[in-house]
Image (cartoon, rainbow, N blue to C red):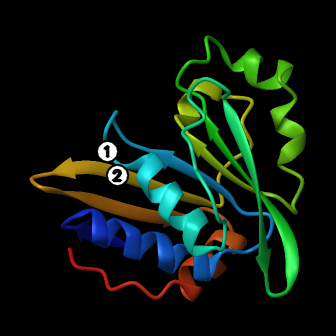
Amino acid sequence: MKAHLRDDAHTAALGLALARALLPGLAIHLHGDLGAGKTALTRALLHAAGHVGNVKSPTYTLSEPYRITLDGAPVNVIHYDLYRMGSPEEFLDAGFREDFDGHNICIVEWPDKAAGVLPPPDLAITLSVAGEGRDVELQAFSALGTSCLQRLHFPPIL
């Protein structure tokens, strides 16, 4: 699925649509240059999923956990920003791989920084700056990712 997000409100609308389509165990990889909107999309998704409070970029902490409720059950969402990682081994040394347990929802910015050790995505989202807005492409790489995209109600514009 491809779409053009013409402004921040449209990015927030995609975050809302994604929040409604989330499934426990999803691994989501976010791709895009600095400033492409990866954290903005994650923030919108978490707020739409019911997180109340600040959603900060985990640039320095590498990960930030959140607790939401999906279909009446509590689910952990862990937001990673691997931009500052020096090597894929740092991902393993931090114990992050254990978070990909089939129950947590893991959202990973800069997944290439953990290439070879990061579990594969169920869903990959690529964002790129396009004029005043952003272009976005969502791709499923598993049955879980396909289910998420099938549940997603967001009009493709491209």
**Where, by quadrant of the figure, is residue 85 drawn?**
top right
Q: Residue furthest left?
A: 131
Q: Secondary structure at mark 1?
A: loop
Query: Residue at 63% across / 73% down in the picture?
Result: 49
Vertical order, 112 against 12 (above or below) = above
* Neighbourhood count class around disc 1 (C-alpha, 10 Å): few under 14, some 14–19, many 20 upward: some
Query: Residue at 48% across / 64% down in the picture?
Result: 44
Q: Secondary structure at mark 2?
A: strand
Q: Nearer the viewer, residue 13 or 47?
A: 47
Q: Amino acid at mark 2?
A: Leu
Vertical order, 136 against 2 (above or below) = above
* Neighbourhood count class around disc 2 (C-alpha, 10 Å): few under 14, some 14–19, many 20 upward: many
Q: Are marks 2 and 1 in contact (CB under 8 Å)?
A: yes
**Where, by quadrant of the figure, is residue 141 drawn?**
bottom right
Vertical order, 144 against 86 (above or below) = below
Residue 116: x and y, percent?
69, 28
Mark 2 / mark 1, whichever is N-terminal: 1
Residue 36's disc is: 1
**From mark 2 to mark 1, how far is it between C-alphas?**
6 Å
Q: Point out the image quarter for the N terminus.
A: bottom left
Residue 103: x and y, percent?
87, 63
Q: Point out the image quarter for the C terminus.
A: bottom left
Label 2: which residue? 127
**Where, by quadrant of the figure, is residue 112 drawn?**
top right
Q: Residue furthest top?
A: 86
